[in-house]
Amino acid sequence: MEYRKIGNTDLELSVITFGSWAVGGWMWGSSDRMKAVHAIRAAFDEGVTSIDTAPVYGQGTSESIVGQALEIIPRDQVQILTKYGMRWDLAKGEFAFKSKDNSGKPIDIYKYADKESIIKECEDSLRRLKTDYIDLYQIHWPDKTTPQSETFEAVERLIEQGKVRYAGVCNYDVSLMEEAGKYINLVSDQIPFSMVNRKTDETTIPWCMKHNKSVLAYSPMERGLLTGKITPGYKFAEGDHRANNSFFTENCIRQTNAFLDKLRPLAREKNVALSQLVLRWTIDHPGITVALVGARDSVQAIENAHAVDVKLTQEDIAFINKELPDISH
C-alpha cells in the first residue's frame, strides 16, 4: 500500500481509501452487514487504513458498520473520515432531495450545518463509530442557509475539544474553499473525479494543488460504470440510485464500454483487472491524493487494494489520456 499526507498535516491516508456509502445500503439496494464488516477487515489486512463514511449513508447504518469493524481493527492504526450537514431527521436548512430509507420509508434530505446541528451530529457519529475522535471531519455539501463562519466555528470547537483532528469539505468549488479558509484551516476537498467525469480537473483540482489542499476523489469507478461490467439494458436492484443516474443511460454505457475496450489489452498485458488499471490511473493523476473506493465484500476489497501494485509508465498514461472520452450524458 502507499500512503500520502493530507495537506500540511501529519495525517496520512492510504491512497486507496475504503468508501462505505454502498455498505450502508441506502440508494444502492440491499447490503449484507457482516460481508461489509469483513470487507473492511480484508481491506485493512491489505494496508487500507483509511475509511470514509457519513451519517446519511443508511441513516446511521454505514457508520455503525464501520464502528463494528473497529471492534476487530486497532483504532490507532486506522483513519476515520466522516461527514456532517445532511439531515434526514430534521426539516431545516436547504432541501436537497426526496429519498427512501433502508426500509423503504419516504424521507426528505436537507443540507443543514448550523452550530447546534454539527455538535449533535458529531456526538451521534462518535457513538455509532464507537470512538472518541474523528480524524477528518467534512461538511457533506455546502449549506446556503448557514453562514460558513458559524459552521466552521463549531468545527473549530470540536477540534479544540479533541473530538476532531482536522477539518475538510466535500463538493466545494474554489470560491467556497476560499471563503471557508477565512474561518478554519481546511486540509482537503472531497470531490467527484473519474476517467469519464473530469469537470473538477478544470479549476478545483489545480487550485487545491496550488494551495496544498488534498483532493479526495470519490466515485473514481463512476459508481461501477468503469468496471466494464455494466451493459446496455442492465437491471439495477430496487432502490439502486444508478437506475436514474445520467451516467447509466444506454448511450453513456455504450460510449464508456467502447473506451474501456481500448484499455483491455493494456490490462491484459499487465495481468491486472480493468478496475485496477482505472484506479492506478486515478491515484497517479496530478492533484489526486487518494481515491475512495467502495466494496461490498472481501474479494472486491482485496482487488481494490492491489490496484497500488499496478505500474503505469509515462507512455501508458499518455495512451490512456489520449483515449479519454467526452461522455454525453
Image: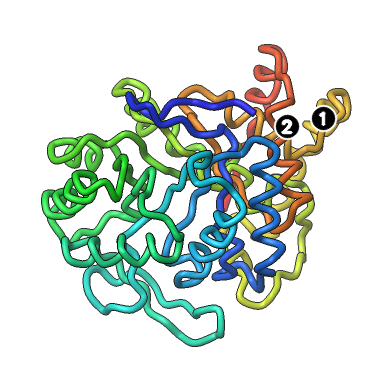
Residue 68 at what x, y percent from top left?
57, 62
Answer yes or no: do the residues labelled 2 and 1 have beta carbons within 8 Å?
Answer: yes
How many circles with numbers are drawn on the protein? Answer: 2
- Relative image position of residue 153 (x, y in whole percent): 14, 49
* Residue designated by label 1: 267
Q: Amino acid at mark 2?
A: Leu
Residue type for callout 1 = Ala
Foreground pick, 126 / 55: 126
Check disc 2 and report the residue beneath it.
277
Q: Is residue 234 above or below residue 152?
A: below
Q: Residues within 10 Å of mark 2 (few under 14, many from 20)?
A: many
- Mark 1: few/some/many CA within 10 Å (<14, 14-19, 20+): some
What residue appears at the point 33 percent right and 45 percent down from the top-left corner? 169
Q: Which of the 4 quarters of the picture holds residue 124? A: bottom left
Residue lying furthest top? 314
Image coords of residue 53 (percent x, y): 48, 55
Q: How is the image coloured?
A: rainbow
Q: Is residue 103 above or below residue 7?
A: below
Q: Which residue is drawn at the image coordinates 60% and 44% (left, top)?
A: 327
Q: Residue at x 59, y 31 (%)?
A: 282
As helix, strand or loop, the secondary structure at mark 2 comes to: helix
Q: Position of residue 87 (x, y in %)?
A: 33, 70
Q: Quick one: 245 or 114, which is closer to the camera?
A: 114
Residues 26 and 145: in front is 26
